[in-house]
Image (tube, rainbow, N blue to C red):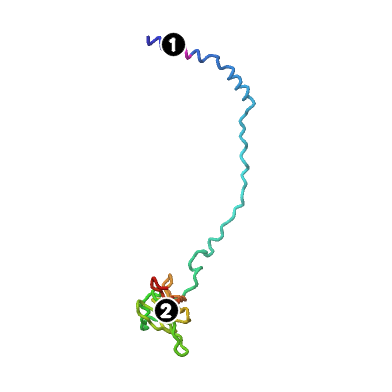
Amino acid sequence: MRRAAIVLACLGLVACAGEEHQDLRQWMKESTKDFKGRIPPLPEIKSFPTVAYEAGELLDPYNAAKIEPERKAGGGGLKPDLERRKEPLEAYPLESLRMVGTLVKGKMVHALVQADKTLHQVKIGNYMGQNFGVITEISETEIKLKEVVPDSLGDYIERTSTLQLQEKEQPEGRK
């Protein structure tokens, strides 16, 4: 029984392999006889002139010595006076101090500066803040200071800062 099934399957396969699709094969052969694979030639390679690199001996444009000004050996230049006796307002960072007003005594203008809950009277030449800030100018609305701060290389540079007059804060509910 098994043998008969195998023989029948083989006969069925042989019958399918006949000339049934011969017309389709003939049409494909005729349709593609004019087609020929053509690959376009590669483009011509352009030759570029050889240029010698001559910048090897030049200074590096990103070298710090090129960007920064020349410094004297040993730092030289500006230094804060570390031997000077500190004034009371030098114990506070400049951001924590508040200018609350001005006073005029004769021709001399004084500013009123609040540190914590204490009121201090300062004039031109007094020091305040933690960066060796000396008062250079006092107006009705601000105090100008010249501070001496360290730079990235450990030397000192001058910087101008201001302390603006603070408006009096009104307690809530009162205006």
Quarter of the image with the N terminus is: top left
Alpha carbons under labels 2 and 1: distance apart: 113 Å
Q: Mark 1: few, some, or many residues within 10 Å (few <14, many ≥20)? A: few
Label located before the other in sequence (2 or 1): 1
Relative side of 144 to 83, left or right: right
Quadrant in the picture for the C terminus: bottom left
Rendered location of residue 165, percent (x, y): 45, 77
Q: Is residue 98 left or right of residue 39?
A: left
Q: Which mark is residue 86?
A: none
- Residue 64 locus on image (x, y percent): 48, 67
Q: Which residues are magenta?
A: 6-13
Against 2, residue 27 (above or below) is below
Q: Position of residue 62 (x, y in %)?
A: 50, 64
Q: Which of the labelled discs sits on residue 8, or is there none?
A: 1
Q: Is residue 130 magenta?
A: no
Residue occupying the far right of the picture: 34
**Front residue of 142 and 4:** 142
Of 81 and 129, the residue lying toward us: 129
Q: Which mark is residue 100?
A: 2
Label 1 sits on what residue type?
Leu
| Residue depth check, mark 2 versus mark 1: number of the one nearer the observer | 2
Residue type at mark 2: give it.
Answer: Val
